[in-house]
Image (spheres, helix red, strand yellow):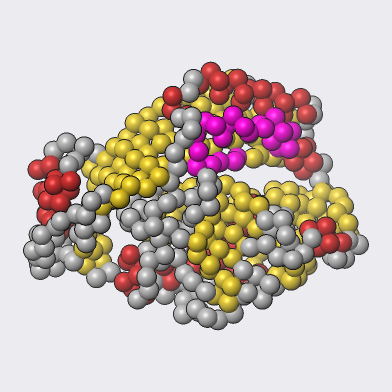
Amino acid sequence: MLSQSSIERILAAALSRGGDFSEVFIEHSKSTSVSLVNGVVESTGSSLDMGIGIRILEGDKCVYVYSNDLYHEDKLIRMAQNASASLSDAPCGKTIYLEPVIEYFSGKPENSLISVSKKLQVEKLRKAGETAKEYSPLITQTSASCAGSEKEIWIANSDGLYVKDNCCRIRASIAAIASSEEDKQQGSYAPGSSEGFEFFERLDLDDLARKSAKIAVTMIDARPCPSGKMPVVIGNGFGGVIFHEACGHALEATSVGIKSSCFTDMLGKQIASPIVSAYDDARIEKEWGSYAVDDEGTPSTTNLLIKDGILNSYLVDKIGSRRMNMPSTGCARRQNYSFAPTSRMSNTFIANGQSDPESIIADTEYGIYAASMGGGSVDTSTGEFNFAVNEAYMIREGKICEAVKGATLIGKGGEVLMNIDRVGNDLKLAQGICGSVSGGVPVDVGQPTIRVSEITVGGQA
């Protein structure tokens, strides 16, 4: 590994020809995974990765280079000098002195997944697959997996910052596919946490397997969804993916800083119903998307994005800070050392409201209950989105009735936020991987049960 004095020399070399700020990101990571299909081990593996990323800023311009060679300082210095030369020929000439290292622990495993026998994981995953298969003769395929990682990272910059972080994450997945002569439907759950093997040990995978199978079987027999504008009640947990995609990305400095967001210059203005408040909170203990310090070395925050319908904050990284003249909110993230960091979400959710979920259904005369959301597409410049609903039911006279399939929700993020007229008190988070220009990062989405008074539902007329 590189010594502190070596890192100081690399940082200085990165400013030798141009640039006003330099940063080094060093990563040492271990990962492991195992996956089964129909009870048969499909893949298993472990990996070790290490590398360094060097970033140079000049105003809001950025140059980023990286290498997996951590043992030849002279090569890294030449790489930093060459990167610096791509900026204006105005050497900074700054001597770099790093402060004593500040150590964080974003996640420390009680029981390291890396050292656990894969046989234990396979046994529990295989049993969950069998549980899903036994739920119904319609279940034709099951899959189950477990994956985890442990990382040490070091971040240093030309301002003297020097931090170290230790983090771990683990995620399990169970899915069931139901088949008929005309159709195939899937149900799945994929919980994750910033913990070690202890998370996997306490998971009730059999219960998740039954729930996954139930969704798949229910949707096989579902009727085609009607289309048109109507009220939609969106279930808690992964229902929050709509806020994440259609609104959250548009609050990131990645788009706001270059004025390509529909929420540019909207601070202090009403963008949602007065009953809506929303957070991005990277400090929730042991959550999948949590961290103690971001990938620029800034401590994480509990960021109140929307307060009573009013836009209160953006998600701001270092480049965004320069472009927007706002302080960083500790949200710079990257998949690994081969990506430059940018503003990203962590655990992003609509906060609890006052309504009981059952009363929201009871007060809905007609509409759709979107119990489980799927994937979709979003244009952050306009907020326009299109999302599939994995599990949906008709609401008639205040009661959840028959299942319907083929439902999609179509609209604009800003309009949906303004049309939320009920917010439940059953907040729940769900885990996923968010992809953007700095790679895929672990995030939580979430919300309580909410009702959108009117939204376009795509289906079958």
Looking at the picture, tell me which residue is in the foreground, 9 or 178: 9
Left or right, 371 with reference to 18: right
Left or right, 7 with reference to 406: left
- Residue 322, given in percent of the width and then of the height, sits at 31, 71
Check if residue 32 falls in the magenta segment.
no
Left or right, 295 with reference to 385: left
The answer to whether residue 31 shows anywhere in this view is yes
The quadrant the N terminus occupies is top left
The answer to whether residue 25 shows anywhere in this view is no
- Give the magenta-colored segment's residue range: 190-212
Chief SS of the magenta region: helix
Q: Residue furthest top?
A: 119
Q: Residue furthest right?
A: 397
- Residue 352, given in percent of the width and then of the height, sits at 67, 62
Quadrant of the rendered image containing residue 74? top left
The quadrant the C terminus occupies is bottom right
Looking at the picture, tell me which residue is in the foreground, 119 or 234: 119
Q: Is residue 53 above or below residue 455?
A: above
Residue at the (66%, 52%) spot, across then down: 428
Looking at the picture, tell me which residue is in the foreground, 224 or 373: 373
- Residue 433, given in percent of the width and then of the height, sits at 51, 47
Quadrant of the rendered image containing residue 57? bottom left
Check if residue 201 falls in the magenta segment.
yes
Residue at the (40%, 60%) spot, across then down: 330
